[in-house]
Amino acid sequence: MVDERVIEFAKTERDIEELEQDLAQSARETKYAQLCKTFSFAALIENMEQLLLDNAKRKTGPREQSAQLLQQMMGTLREADTHTEKFYKQLITLTDENIMQQRLNAATGYFTDKVMKPCIVQISAHIVALSGHAKTSKQLTAWRELKDIFQEKINEMNGLTPPRLAEIQINF
């Protein structure tokens, strides 16, 4: 079985310079798509919304405190997503790889230090508060998983792990 694109490529009589430009453009589009996925917080927000729904069913532990924390963090992540949209628009216009790398480093630093790490600190404090209550083991497990997801997202932004956030579901 032969791919249609291979046949089309063989039929074209374009010069090497055009082909190199097409290749560079395709590589740029692929990189852009990967960056969009890496800096998106949509899957994390979706997991937190599920955790909020599950939290509403709980009769033990500080339910209101958990709900407030989740809503606060979701608001922070939604705000970060609006910053991400501006970041995407900026990336599209950049042609210099060095400037793009500087912007990526700045974005990684911003989202890590101003968004993700404060959320992890809040989650850690909430885990400590939950551990003082009876019958909260399932909630503690869910909050620990959420903390791990935040850490994975930081690692993903730093390029240390492949994108797995969409595959992870919190079982509350």
Image (cartoon, helix red, strand yellow):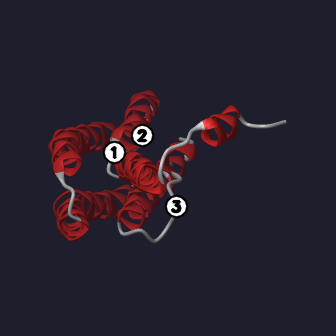
- Tell me, yes or no, whether the two marked residues, 1 and 2, touch with CB atoms within 8 Å: yes
Q: Which of 26 and 158 is in front in this view?
A: 26
Q: Nearer the viewer, residue 36 or 47?
A: 36
Give percent across and percent down for residue 61. 39, 44
Give percent across and percent down for residue 73. 24, 45
- Tell me, yes or no, whether the two marked residues, 2 and 3, touch with CB atoms within 8 Å: no
Task: Identify which residue is drawn at 39% across, 46% down.
Answer: 29
Question: In the displayed structure, does residue 90 sit left or right of residue 138?
Answer: left
Q: Which of 33 and 76 is in front in this view?
A: 33
Mark 1 or mark 2, whichever is nearer to me: 1
Give percent across and percent down for residue 145. 49, 55
On screen, residue 151 above or below 149:
below
Question: In the displayed structure, does residue 61 sit left or right of residue 10?
Answer: left
Instruction: Judge the density around disc 2: few (<14), some (14-19), many (≥20) Cα neighbours within 10 Å.
Output: some
Q: Can I make out residue 6 in this image?
A: yes
User: Which residue is identified by label 3?
Assistant: 162
User: Which residue is identified by label 2?
Assistant: 43
Instruction: Judge the density around disc 1: few (<14), some (14-19), many (≥20) Cα neighbours within 10 Å.
Output: many
Instruction: Judge the density around disc 3: few (<14), some (14-19), many (≥20) Cα neighbours within 10 Å.
Output: few
| Kind of residue sitting beneath label 1 | Ser
Q: Quadrant of residue 152?
A: bottom left
Element marked by disc 2: helix
Mark found first going from the N terminus, 2 or 3:
2
Give the number of the disc on residue 154: none
Mark 2 or mark 3, whichever is nearer to me: 3
Give the number of the disc on residue 40: 1
Q: How far apart are marks 3 and 1 (CA)?
A: 14 Å
On screen, residue 90 above or below 2:
below
On screen, residue 144 above or below 6:
below
